[in-house]
Amino acid sequence: MTTGLSLGIGIAVLAVGTYLIRLAGPLLRNRYSVSANAERLMDRATVVLLVAVALTGAFFAGHDFAGWARPAGVAVGIVAAVLRAPIAVVVILAAATAAGLRAVGIA
């Protein structure tokens, strides 16, 4: 197979699989039940996964450490979000912190 054809087949398989997984939720909702402990565990697992992805993006650029400016900007953004600042203010503070640190030579 050519590279373009195999790429197209891969995209099609991924699209169909994604659609079937999304369709399975509403179809199986009444047929399968989980315990309260399992529901709490799944809720926590979701949060842990999102935090892990966010931290990986905050600390690494590819395979290398991103430098101290990016994690500092993320930390300032988290503090602003915890203090219930508007999302635009959170983003601007985080970006300004990272840019300011990079401007003074802290990469």
Image (spheres, helix red, strand yellow):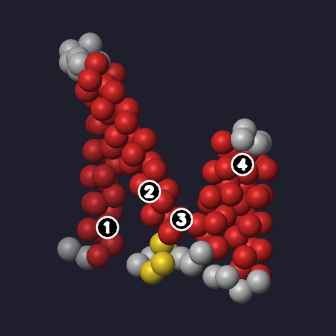
The N terminus lies in quadrant: bottom left
Residues at circles 3 and 2 in contact by the CB criterion of under 8 Å: no
- Cα separation, mark 1 vs mark 2, equals 26 Å
| Circle count | 4
* Mark 3 or mark 1: whose residue is earlier in sequence: 1
Q: What element does badge 3 sit on?
A: helix
Going by the numbered disc 1, the residue's amino acid type is: Leu
* Front: mark 4 or 2: 4
- Residue at the (71%, 60%) spot, across then down: 94
Q: Amino acid at mark 2?
A: Val
**For the residue marked with disc 3, what is the amino acid?**
Ala
Q: Earlier in the sequence, mark 4 or mark 3?
A: 3
**Crowd band around label 3 with a 10 angstrom C-alpha radius: few (<14), some (14–19), many (20+):** many
Q: From the image, tell me which residue sits under label 1.
A: 7
C-alpha gap between disc 4 and disc 2: 20 Å
For residue 80, the mark is 4
Looking at the rendered structure, the secondary structure element under dot 2 is helix
Determine whether 37 is above or below 6 in the image.
Answer: above
According to the image, label 2 marks what residue?
Answer: 53
Q: Which residue is mark 3?
A: 58
**Quadrant into which the C terminus falls:** bottom right
Q: Are marks 4 and 1 in contact (CB under 8 Å)?
A: no
Percent of width and height locating residue 40? 33, 27
